[in-house]
Amino acid sequence: MVTIKKFDGYQDLAEIFQDLDLKFSFVKNNKQVTMPAKCRDFLGDCLWSRATKKKVSVYSFEYDYKETPYEVKEVQLTIKFPDSNKRINFINNLAFIHEKEKQAGIKKLTKIEETQEKDTLFITASKLWQTLPWTLALYTYYLKVMSLKDPNHVTVKPEAGYKKWIDPMESTILSWVKKKIAYSWHDDIYAQHNYSGVISMLKKVNNNLIKLYQ
């Protein structure tokens, strides 16, 4: 069991409704360094803060990498589940994310540990998943559907819609996870937040991003 120090403070985040109310937080030195949030794009915003050396202030989410850096040697996250059934499903579905990692050629497989907080797990994984916002969005999408009984059968919103976009291109986008590219970050944090995830890339909303991989 890992003892995690909870995030110090509170931010009243503006988040859309989601059927699966899992809350993600970046961790460093066993301490949550970001406000637990169900909107996974906030995690990508933290990558933006590190890359641009700017403070994030978007939809009431505040973060400055210079003040509270997240772990960069590997992915470190806590996930707070809405109930014990979702947490147990997640643990039972560990092989699901391991299979995706093997397809992507990632050797450091995701590890799950219990924490002292109710229905809260500590996750560690390869730093490759947090190379760019879209890779982190893909990874956390997989983590989120692992809380379902069957992560391959997704009917909840908005993940069911994401699945329709990801599945036809899955083998290709998994092969992109380790690909090194010259990436241009948005100047505006709202553009970064809204148009830097894996679905924006697949929908070609962010044309500059998908062209880098073609």
Image (cartoon, rainbow, N blue to C red):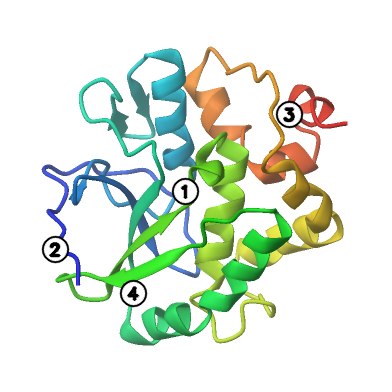
Indicate the position of residue 151 as horizontal and vertical percent values. Answer: 62, 77
Residue sitting nearer the eye, 189 or 210: 210
Q: Nearer the viewer, mark 2 or mark 4?
A: 2
20 versus 129 height, above or below = below
The image quadrant that residue 111 belongs to is bottom left
Please tell me the numbered disc located at residue 82.
4
The image quadrant that residue 145 belongs to is bottom right
| Callout 1 secondary element | loop
Whole-number angstrom distance, CA of label 2 to CA of label 1: 23 Å
Quick one: quadrant of the C terminus? top right
Of mark 3 and mark 2, the one earlier in the sequence is 2
Q: Are marks 3 and 4 in contact (CB under 8 Å)?
A: no
Please tell me the numbered disc located at residue 40.
1
Indicate the position of residue 115 as horizontal and vertical percent values. Answer: 21, 69
Residue 64 placement, left or right of 43: left
Please tell me the numbered disc located at residue 206.
3
Whole-number angstrom distance, CA of label 3 to CA of label 2: 39 Å
Whole-number angstrom distance, CA of label 2 to CA of label 4: 20 Å
Crowd rating for badge 2 (residues with CA inside 10 Å; few <14, some 14–19, many 20+): few
Whole-number angstrom distance, CA of label 1 to CA of label 3: 18 Å
The residue that disc 2 covers is: 3
Q: Are marks 2 and 1 in contact (CB under 8 Å)?
A: no
Of mark 2 and mark 4, the one earlier in the sequence is 2
Q: Amino acid at mark 1?
A: Arg
